[in-house]
């Protein structure tokens, strides 16, 4: 027997997984949960780039990004509730939280963020909602009456107050969006028993990937919706978004690689198990898909789109394609962190296997439904909140 | 010649284990199986002073669990007793026994088929090199002084009692599984029947009635020991205060387990 063969045999034989680790507990639902909250946080940051940092070229998507964030925020807890063994007790997390738990704060942070986002939308849209209320009849009139909070006052003083409120909300919204997703990273990063998760870089990586997925979601949906509805696409806006996407992705990808590099370089006793994980069960989903295809290609291509003078058509088309790839990259990252981390047994001597079911309670079909629901809700929201300035009655009235 | 000797030893070991399994399990399980049927109070007190305890909480006690690796024979009686005591669903383990085999190339092979529930009746035959050393390691809740599971539970369903037990309030648990992820020892699982977190309790309900944990009761070789460290006459006190090779699992985690191992090897995780 050759020495190499001997090693191979030994590796296979030493594959010991603690009996309770054979079952991967946090399934697709916990993959989707940080994915959805990340999209929410990222989309909000896009909106804030205009509302707080006054990047004027992002005006066309500044309001849409907020509604987009709300559509996903509404379903951020759906996978969690579906995952819980006792969802009927979920409110205990807010009623009787344990102050030492990294998870107990989520209900508060999520709720506070939801309040800020909803108020921001209502104040930014108030002139529009007032105009729509005047046109509407029946139920829609009642709905707009509620959404305008009973005030039809569009005097310059009132709008000035609105503006101050929205600027304030957007300003506190940025740290809150960062907290929301940095915190989601900490839920994983604080698990000391799992050497793959337990790194202070985890919240940073989660936050950066959140920004990336939110910006990518806005680019893709903006291009698709505007194209589908036959409306013009503001290329200045798309080009600016692509530059931000590239910038954020540089940081995101570099930190993701630094994290693995640090583990490899320090080469503690954990590294052996981590290396076997990356090169074993995660080879295709991590090395090939996440890093090879869906990181390196967008990494280079987004740079080309940002730096090289290209026609609007190419930038629009490839901007959308690369955004879709980035969205896949972030989903793969969530999978590799959440599922991958659990595949490594705490025995550090072996890996479990995980194949998601199709029709199970937390399976692929349910996952697809949960990802489609925000899109359906976004469509419903479009019936109430006009996404674009060019179909906003308040803008027409002002320009007329 | 060497191989023949090894085979002979192996045969002898097998016969011995079979005898132990036949006699000891049957005998020792009798101590546990009727326990549910009869009044626990009628069984003579096994932990001195427990029946004099007044009030809802145990006071003045500091319990410890000791596993003596040098004694365990891997018969699986403890696992059977535990499964019987708690009706643990298949595929989940409140306690299990691992078999360690180290060959002369220093490769470490560990297995725990069915959590050791069936006992290790056959030696491993799939190893490429001659065996240097073998031993069994029973695992159970470490009842940490600084339990990660208590720290992460979002609703306080997992809690630590004054007397050092880490327990679960099954009526509060939301079944999020964060404690399962946080436990460095993987002793927790989500019970598929109750859909709540579950784990070994060191048989708190028995201890309250002055009885030893079920697994301690049935162990035919006294590899599992349980007692009060405040009682200087207890066996656990004596073991922990005498010169022994004693350690805890994953000390670097900082959890400070109350589960101690006599003769723990560096290979054990």
Image (spheres, rainbow, N blue to C red):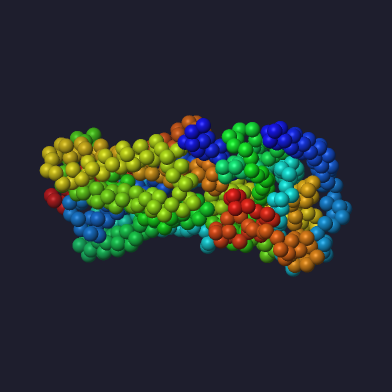
| Residue at (49% x, 33% y) in the render | A2
Q: Nearer the viewer, residue A345 or A154?
A: A345
Q: Nearer the viewer, residue B38 or A262?
A: A262
Q: Residue furthest front?
A: B1
Q: In the rendered view of the protein, which quadrant contains the N terminus of chain B?
A: top right
Q: Looking at the image, can residue B266 be seen? A: yes
Q: Judge whether B163 appears above or below A303 on screen.
A: below
Q: How many numbered marks have been drawn onto this rendered protein structure? A: 0
| Residue at (45% x, 33% y) in the render | A365
Pinpoint residue B62: horizontal percent, then vertical percent: 71, 64
Name the side, left or right, on which B163 lies relative to A374.
right
Q: Nearer the viewer, residue A294 or B17?
A: B17
Pinpoint residue B63: horizontal percent, then vertical percent: 72, 61
Which quadrant of the structure image shows residue B101? Answer: top right
Pinpoint residue B207: horizontal percent, then vertical percent: 76, 56
Which quadrant of the structure image shows residue B242? Answer: bottom right
| Residue at (41% x, 52% y) in the render | A263
Pinpoint residue A359: horizontal percent, then vertical percent: 50, 31
């Amino acid at each position: 027997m050759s020495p190499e063969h001997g090693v191979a045999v030994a590796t296979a034989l030493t594959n010991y997984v603690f009996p309770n680790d054979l079952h991967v507990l946090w399934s697709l639902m916990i993959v989707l949960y940080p994915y959805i909250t990340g999209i929410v946080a990222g989309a909000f940051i896009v909106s804030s780039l205009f509302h707080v940092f006054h990047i004027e070229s992002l005006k066309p998507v500044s309001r849409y990004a907020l509604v987009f964030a709300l559509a996903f925020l509404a379903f951020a807890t759906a996978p969690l509730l579906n995952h819980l063994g006792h969802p009927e007790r979920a409110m205990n997390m807010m009623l009787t939280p344990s102050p030492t738990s990294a998870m107990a704060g989520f209900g508060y942070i999520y709720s506070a963020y939801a309040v800020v986002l909803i108020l921001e939308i209502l104040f930014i849209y108030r002139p529009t909602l007032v105009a729509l209320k005047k046109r509407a009849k029946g139920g829609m009139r009642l709905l707009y009456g509620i959404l305008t909070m009973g005030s039809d006052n569009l005097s310059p003083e009132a709008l000035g107050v609105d503006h101050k409120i929205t600027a304030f909300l957007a300003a506190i919204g940025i740290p809150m969006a960062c907290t929301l997703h940095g915190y989601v990273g900490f839920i994983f990063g604080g698990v000391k028993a799992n050497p793959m998760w337990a790194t202070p870089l985890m919240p940073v990586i989660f936050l950066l990937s959140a920004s990336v997925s939110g910006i990518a979601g806005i680019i893709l949906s903006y291009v698709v919706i505007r194209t589908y509805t036959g409306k013009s696409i503001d290329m200045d806006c798309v080009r600016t978004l692509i530059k931000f996407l590239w910038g954020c992705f540089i940081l995101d990808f570099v930190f993701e690689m630094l994290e693995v590099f640090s583990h490899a370089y320090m080469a503690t006793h954990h590294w052996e198990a981590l290396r076997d994980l990356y090169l074993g069960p995660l080879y295709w989903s991590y090395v090939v898909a996440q890093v090879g295809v869906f990181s390196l290609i967008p990494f280079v291509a987004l740079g080309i789109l940002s730096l090289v003078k290209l026609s609007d058509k190419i930038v629009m088309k490839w901007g959308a394609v690369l955004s879709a790839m980035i969205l896949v990259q972030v989903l793969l990252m969530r999978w590799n962190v959440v599922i991958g981390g659990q595949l490594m047994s705490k025995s550090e001597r072996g890996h479990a296997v995980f194949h998601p079911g199709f029709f199970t309670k937390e399976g692929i079909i349910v996952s697809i439904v949960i990802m489609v629901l925000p899109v359906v809700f976004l469509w419903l929201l479009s019936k109430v909140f006009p996404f674009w300035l060019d179909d906003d009655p308040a803008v027409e009235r002002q320009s007329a | 010649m060497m191989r023949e000797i090894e085979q002979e030893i192996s045969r002898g070991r097998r016969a011995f284990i079979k005898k132990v399994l036949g006699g000891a399990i049957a005998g020792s399980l009798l101590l546990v199986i009727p326990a549910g049927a009869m009044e626990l109070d009628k069984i003579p007190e096994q932990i001195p002073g427990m029946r004099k305890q007044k009030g809802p909480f145990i006071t003045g006690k500091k319990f410890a669990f000791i596993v003596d690796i040098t004694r365990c024979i891997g018969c699986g009686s403890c696992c059977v007793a535990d499964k019987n005591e708690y009706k643990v669903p298949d595929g989940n383990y409140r306690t299990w026994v691992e078999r360690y085999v180290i060959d002369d190339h220093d490769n470490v092979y560990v297995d725990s088929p069915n959590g050791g529930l069936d006992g290790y009746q056959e030696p491993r035959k799939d190893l490429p090199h001659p065996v240097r050393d073998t031993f069994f390691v029973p695992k159970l809740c470490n009842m940490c002084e600084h339990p990660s599971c208590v720290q992460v539970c979002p609703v306080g369903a997992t809690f630590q009692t004054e007397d050092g037990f880490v327990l679960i309030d099954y009526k509060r648990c939301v079944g999020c599984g964060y404690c399962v992820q946080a436990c460095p020892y993987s002793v927790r699982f989500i019970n598929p029947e109750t859909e709540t977190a579950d784990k070994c309790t060191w048989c708190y309900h028995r201890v309250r009635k002055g009885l030893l944990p079920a697994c301690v009761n049935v162990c035919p070789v006294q590899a599992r020991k349980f007692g009060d460290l405040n009682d200087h006459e207890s066996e656990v006190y004596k073991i922990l205060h005498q010169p022994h090779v004693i350690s805890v699992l994953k000390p670097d985690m900082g959890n400070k387990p109350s589960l101690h191992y006599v003769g723990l090897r560096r290979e054990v995780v």
